[in-house]
Image (cartoon, grey):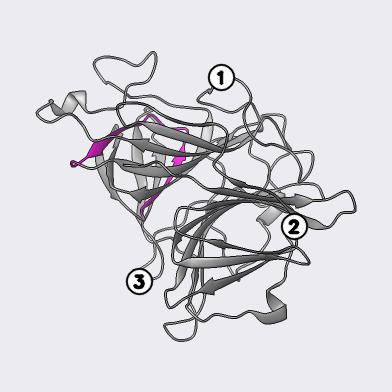
Amino acid sequence: MAFDVRRVVTGHDAAGRPVWLSDGTPAATVEAPNGTAVSDLFLLDGPPAGAAAGGDPTGPRVLEPPPGGCSCRVIRFPPPPPGAPVEEHWVRVPGDDPARPGMHATDTLDFMIVLHGRIVLGLDDGEHHLAAGDTVIQRGTDHRWRVEGDEPCTYLVVMLRTDPAAAAPAVSLAPRASAAPTGFGPRRLVTATDGAGRSFALLDGEPPLVHTPIGPDGAVMVDLWQTGGPLRRPDQGGDPGGAWELDPLGGGIAFRLVRLPAGHDPGSRGWHTTPSIDLDLILSGRMELALPDAGTVVLDPGDAVIQRATEHKWQPLGDEAVRMAAVMLTVPV
């Protein structure tokens, strides 16, 4: 099974005009003979100083980004060997306990979405089975992973490293109870740690902030998580209340899903800029991304975009709705 990853990067030229910086396979993309594969889409090695911060990693791959930093990866794990005991299916990590293979924790807030296949998230409260489209908010808790079934599992994960020196969040947020299913929002599993230090699934269902359209074929905006400011703790953040806002609250970080219906044409109103580096991934459908005076690119499922606070416009193509995941990192601009 080919591991084809395409990444488009936007930026600005010397005059400040939006331009395409690159379009192709990220340099830090590797595939092992056993089918394991990783593609580093973006690495931020500390709190961003501006929209041009971050890029491709240049040294050995490490699990956690530096304090205040961020990593964005597409990872594929192969299915377990036929006949192997379940306890041998867990993905091992250096230094884990053989009595609990693969169990580990990181000083990060992780946003994860399953792209293909099935995978099991192991917490202290048991096993949680995930399929394509399911999302996880992993808040520095003990956890482990194993692929389920006889096909590989591919997922996107954004790891946000804490920065104890960061300012306190400007907006105080907390997880809110899952909403009654609407058919628009994805499944979201939120992890937590109890008073005894054991990890468990705090929430498992549709997030509460799903902005649905009037009628079944309009645009849908889903807030999966927001930090309310720079990240100081892995359990920081939660669900906003009230009306949906485009920019991340409190100058923080937002994890979102967007659905644009077939035929959606925003016209001149679609042009916009946000004070953020956006890590975008097309989940389904075909999308056209335009920059003023720089033309367009066409994006297919699995294609990623690193949007560096550039003016841009999205428009679906064809007769299928487009679903896109986005992580927005507020930066000084």
Cβ atoms at labels 2 and 3 below 8 Å apart:
no
Q: Quadrant of residue 208?
A: bottom left
Q: CA distance from mark 2 to mark 3?
A: 32 Å
Does residue 228 appear in this view?
Answer: no
The structure residue drawn at horizontal position 40% and vertical position 70%, both measured from the top left corner, is 184
Q: Is residue 148 left or right of residue 18?
A: left
Q: Mark 2 or mark 3, which is nearer to you?
A: 2
Q: Is residue 53 above or below residue 308?
A: above
Q: Is residue 315 above or below residue 78?
A: below
**Residue 183, which numbered label?**
3
Question: Range of the magenta residues?
Answer: 134-150
Q: CA distance from mark 1 to mark 2?
A: 30 Å
**Helix, strand or loop for disc 2:** loop
Reading the image, the residue beneath label 1 is: 60
The structure residue drawn at horizontal position 52% and vertical position 76%, both measured from the top left corner, is 219
How far across and down, in percent of the image, does residue 275 sit? Answer: 75, 55
The amino acid type, in three-letter code, at marker 3 is: Gly
Q: Residue furthest left?
A: 83
Does residue 59 appear in this view?
Answer: yes
**Helix, strand or loop for disc 3:** loop
Residue 223 included in the magenta stretch of the image: no
Q: Mark 3 or mark 1, which is nearer to you?
A: 1
- Dot 2, how many residues are within 10 Å of its Cα: few (below 14), some (14-19), or many (20+)? many
Q: Residue furthest right?
A: 15
Reading the image, the residue beneath label 2 is: 310
- Dot 1, how many residues are within 10 Å of its Cα: few (below 14), some (14-19), or many (20+)? few
Q: Is residue 71 left or right of residue 76?
A: right
The amino acid type, in three-letter code, at marker 1 is: Pro
